[in-house]
Amino acid sequence: TQLLEQSPQFLSIQEGENLTVYCNSSSVFSSLQWYRQEPGEGPVLLVTVVTGGEVKKLKRLTFQFGDARKDSSLHITAAQPGDTGLYLCAGGSNDYKLSFGAGTTVTVRA
Amino acid sequence: EAQVTQNPRYLITVTGKKLTVTCSQNMNHEYMSWYRQDPGLGLRQIYYSMNVEVTDKGDVPEGYKVSRKEKRNFPLILESPSPNQTSLYFCASSLGGRSYNEQFFGPGTRLTVL
């Protein structure tokens, strides 16, 4: 059983469209991270959120941490082919333990 | 360039033949860990190390060994590999090891055990 559930598992959209990826759990997390992984490479950190209700923006990417710190979302505005990749959320359940979701594969078609 | 390196990148072996996957980081990070990535299961932690000579089990340690004799190196050892250890393996390091610290991942090692 996955501690963190990501949805959807796969997402294919046209360039210029918006998309949202969700990360949900029944557990409370002290922190939540989003990573992006491209084929043949390791994951790369996009953002860390630590406060319930926190919203962070990184250019066209908007990250939100739920008020109860059990869920998070990643929204991409006007997606570009360069946004294609596997998006992973990772929750910190105590100071040193990090649990990853299975990931959402995003494909942006030109 | 700050990086985590792993070798080999690809490995095909047979059941029972001992192998070692090396991992090295040049960022002077205290914390290092090993993950395996399988379709539909995400990244699962195998072992981690808080510092030199300090290692501990992650979520799926069975069939694996690690050592941390130097700060920069954290090899993963499979004493007797089995087909269920066929997977994509990642080494990662971070400055402090806390869950909110950024983890820097290596490029991955794709292992196939026949």
Image: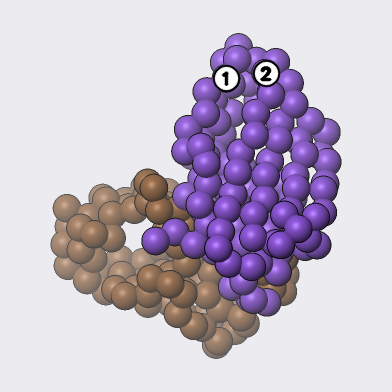
Q: Nearer the viewer, residue B90 or A109?
A: A109
- Crowd band around label 1 with a 10 angstrom C-alpha radius: few (<14), some (14–19), many (20+): some
Q: Tell me if A71 is positioned left or right of A5 in this view.
A: right
Image-quadrant location for residue A83: top right
**Marks 2 and 1 close (CB-CB < 8 Å):** yes
Specify whether residue A11 is in view: yes
Q: Which residue occupies 82% across, 54% down?
A: A54
Q: Which residue occupies 44% across, 59% down?
A: A2
Q: Position of residue B21 (x, y in %)?
A: 40, 63
The brown-tinted chain is: B
Q: Nearer the viewer, residue B87 or B42?
A: B42
Chain under disc 2: A
Q: Which residue occupies 43% across, 72% down?
A: B59
Q: Which color is chain A depicted in? A: purple
| Residue at disc 1, secondary structure | strand
> Which residue in the protein does label 2 denote?
A17
Q: How many numbered marks does the figure carry?
A: 2
Q: Tell me if A34 is positioned left or right of B59 in this view.
A: right
Q: Tell me if A67 is positioned left or right of B58 in this view.
A: right
Chain under disc 1: A
Identified by mark 1, the residue type is: Ile
Identified by mark 2, the residue type is: Glu
Specify whether residue B8 is in view: no
Note whether A40 is above or below B56 in the view shown.
above
> Which residue in the protein does label 1 denote?
A13
Q: Position of residue B97 (x, y in %)?
A: 66, 73
Q: Position of residue B101 (x, y in %)?
A: 72, 65
| Residue at disc 2, secondary structure | loop
Q: Which mark is residue B7?
A: none
- Crowd band around label 2 with a 10 angstrom C-alpha radius: few (<14), some (14–19), many (20+): few
Q: Which residue occupies 24% across, 59% down?
A: B84
